[in-house]
Image: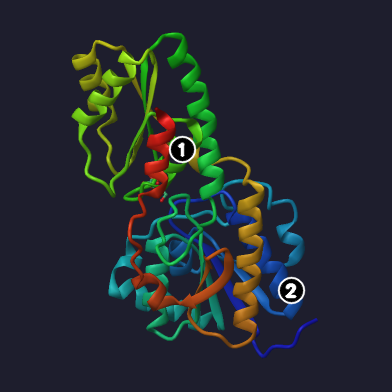
Amino acid sequence: MNETTVKKIGVLTSGGDAPGMNAAIRSVVRTADEYDIKVVGIERGYEGLLHGEINEMSGKDVSGIMNRGGTVLHTARSEEMRTPEGVAKAAQVCKILQLDALVIIGGNGSLAGGLDLSKHGVNIMGIPGTIDLDLDCSDYTIGFDTAVNTSLDAVNKIRETSCSHERCSVVEVMGRKCGQIALWTGMAGGAEEVLVPEDPVDFDKVVEQILENRSRGKNHNLIVVAEGVGHSQELADYIEKITGIQTRATILGHLQRGGQPTAKDRLAAGIMGYNAVKLIAEGARNRIMIVRDGKYTDIDLAEGLKYKREYDKTLYDILKVLAI
Ligand code: F6P
């Protein structure tokens, strides 16, 4: 058993769920056990915090959850937490519950809520959990790998029928304003084109590419479109109208959020959950667990949320070379 003066912490999952969140909860609870810190699991993210929906959790309670997608604590997007009154109320609940720290597993919006809470004196440890890989301060967010593999599985299947029918397939993947799921899925799925919100989109260039492919004897095409670009059906209709090639649009949607977490996501969740509790036990305040240059580390919460990463086109450029 490790020594600490910390007595009690809370853990919640917030925003869109991500495969690996359960593994992160397990890691937080089991590491806290190691320090003899009490853990309360807060239901439905900030919604549950605002309404005091909590349950004490021990190592035994998190048995058999690390292999499951979703989150056993449930999650929500809380409108109330977007208001100063909601934040003040949530901070007051943390005080009443005598939480020495709150571990938040979630994406940008959820961690921004954590930053607001920290300004009221709540000690926040953030764990990036989102399929979108859109937290600029970290090279990795829990759930991304599973989501990409799920999209890839769908794309592989769509490619088969697209090939049989000599069609063009437009597949839209999630990612909010971030094109990473699209880029990775496109690269791994051998897409002819990927459209991401970080880059200007030109439907005519897509059509040109398809026509060029046809002149070289390529009779099926896969176009991956990021959610932040959208308009997949319009693009499919446009391609069909201009080229005469039958084109189908598929929006993969929420299936990308479910499924058993991959080894990579379980590992990231295990390490980040462990690091978060260790930091709390050692007296650290307001940090986000991150991956940078292949290393698991942590950064100041406010600084981390301010961080802006430049869009790196390298993956796209390689994809275009390989698509020829
Ligand atoms: O942030 C994860 C995510 O799945 C995004 O990719 C997507 O834009 C959004 O959540 C969908 O949210 P909801 O499940 O609330 O429709």
* Label 1 vs 2, first from the N-terminus: 2
Please state which of residues 111 and 246 is positioned toward the viewer in this rendering. Answer: 246
- Mark 1 residue type: Met
Q: Position of residue 29 (x, y in %)?
A: 68, 68
Q: Residue at x 27, y 40 (%)?
A: 229
Q: Is residue 108 left or right of residue 38?
A: left
List the single residue furthest toward the bottom. Answer: 5
- The numbered mark at residue 69 is none
Look at the image and tell me in which quarter the N terminus lies: bottom right
Q: Which residue is under mark 1?
A: 187
Q: Nearer the viewer, residue 189 or 133?
A: 189
Residue situated in front as seen by the camera: 224 or 131 = 224
Q: Relative to residue 293, is residue 245 drawn left or right?
A: left
Compared to residue 229, the image places residue 266 above or below, namely below
In the rendered image, residue 25, in percent from the top left (x then y), is placed at 62, 62
* Quadrant of the rendered image containing residue 209: top left
Dot 2: what SS?
helix
Label 1, secondary structure: give it.
helix
Q: Which residue is mark 2?
A: 33
